[in-house]
Image (cartoon, coloured by chain):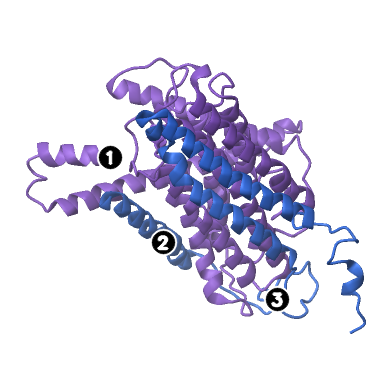
Amino acid sequence: MLYDFANIVVFLVLTGVLVFGTLLVGRLVRTQKPTPEKNTIYECGEPPFGSSWVRYNIRFYNIALVFLIFDVEVVCLFPVILVLQHFKLISRTLMLVAVGEVAFFVVVLVIALIYAWHKGALDWLRAPESPYSVEESHNPE
Amino acid sequence: MRELIEYLLTHVPLLTKVPSIFVYAVFILIGAGVVLGYISVMVIIWVYLERKVAGHIQARYGPMRVGPHGILQTIADAIKLFMKEDIIIPTSHKVLFIIAPFLVFFGAFAPFVVLPYSESLYLSKMNVGVFYLLALTAFEVIGIIMAGWGSNNKWALYGGMRHAAQMICYELPMGISVLTVVVFTGSLTLHGITNAQGWLPWQWFISPLKSPFTFIAGFVFYIAGLAATKRVPFDLPEAESELVAGYHAEYSGMRFAFFFLAEYTAMYLVCAVTSLLFLGGWNGPLPRAQGWLGNLLGLINVLSKTYFLLFVMLWLRWTLPRLRIDQLLSTSLKYLLPISLGALLGAAIQSAIF
């Protein structure tokens, strides 16, 4: 166990050394002549306007919510699925019960998926009749 | 690796005199260095091959000028990137901008801790193997969002957010198709999963004779892997013709090189994991043998399958057009997710009945 974590820590240190070490060594050979033009943001040659740290499209948030539900599902399924074969060695009934539980869990989440699908949470381009319609966003305030 | 260290500790009298933790540290460092070196060299060769294959698929030559048939092209590119000026835009968020390449790079390299190259060529046989692998790839998402946001560039922000959305969407079918395999193996280590498959092609998990559900899961895993490494047809985050370069638009020189390296490492990782989980890994077409010969044959088996899958990635790149973002997300959430859930349920029922 400790050995495995030692491996990960060594990888963390080694990648860190590689990334920042290379940049440090590169400082000796590379040119460094900043000009105002180089230090502007690249926006296809136009002078950049405004900051890009703005409020962002809500649709990404929706996708992240759907992801959260199913990722938790995957994480919860991992321990159960892992012991299925061990249950099979103990008794067939135990395994059938476990599979039934897995099936129940998955079916409940599939219902959630169908609900989200029906509500249009999975659609990138919303149909106009959905509750978050285009007309609402055009309110004159 | 661990067995090797323990063997050396008990059999080499010189090593028993120094503290064992020191020996462990040195050998782990050597192992990790070998893996990092292998991947870096592999990327250099693979980038050259990719450009050559891309050229020949389009009936042109690809790189020809640097060295005979352009074999030194990638090395020249690497040297050029090394010498390039390192620009950090004054208006960017400096901390995020500097940390992002490191996080992406670490997220691409850390899964190699659990990746075996043959039966006894591996760094660590962690009992959470595949789970660790799936978890560590999430580092890349964080790094990419940091790069996109930290650059203070609209294109970078678009690219970063698109990539984050794409990666989290395709992580779901990926995780579920791994679970489909775990149903039959009862083990999360890549060793356990590979050894659960037999020596012949129809005993591998990709074969419909072994189980039709892992057959489906294999394809789902590979497609999701394509999307997670943002290869065509899922290359929306960097779509050269729409966003200038995606989340690394503001990165120059070596900082960009690390993103590039991480991307190719992730490609290799997806192909290697697919070959281990579904294509039998070292249980290959080559005959079984004992000792170092067996390891060599196993290594050749794993590498040939991995490189074949990498070649398929190139092939797809010049065959399929790019998807739209709504098609991309609906491919994942409306098709791959229900298919992989169905395959998981089917696999559980199959293993319960037979």
Q: Within 10 Å of the Cα at label 3, are there few (<14), some (14-19), or many (20+) other Cα atoms?
A: few
Instruction: Please give the letter of the chain rendered in blue.
Output: A
Question: Disc 2 and disc 1: Cα gap in Å?
Answer: 23 Å
Q: Within 10 Å of the Cα at label 2, are there few (<14), some (14-19), or many (20+) other Cα atoms?
A: some
Q: Which sits in the foreground, B141 or A23?
A: B141
Same chain for the residues under marks 2 and 1 in the image = no
Q: Position of residue B18 (x, y in %)?
A: 10, 52
Mark 1: which secondary structure? loop
Picture quadrant of residue B343: top right
Mark 2: which secondary structure? helix
Q: Amino acid at mark 3?
A: Glu
Picture quadrant of residue B144: bottom right
Question: Disc 3 and disc 2: Cα gap in Å?
Answer: 31 Å
Q: Position of residue B36 (x, y in %)?
A: 41, 47
Q: Which residue is mark 1?
A: B1
Report in which chain the residue with disc 2 lies: A
Quarter of the image with the N terminus of chain B in it: top left
The tint of chain B in the picture is: purple
Extreme-bottom residue of the structure: A141
Residue depicted at x 37% and y 54%: A11
Residue depicted at x 14% and y 42%: B9
Same chain for the residues under marks 3 and 1 in the image = no
Question: Disc 3 and disc 1: Cα gap in Å?
Answer: 52 Å
Whether residue B297 is situated above or below residue B11 in the rendered picture: above
| Mark toward the start of the polypeptide (3 vs 2) | 2
Front tag of 3 and 1: 1
Q: Which residue is mark 2?
A: A16
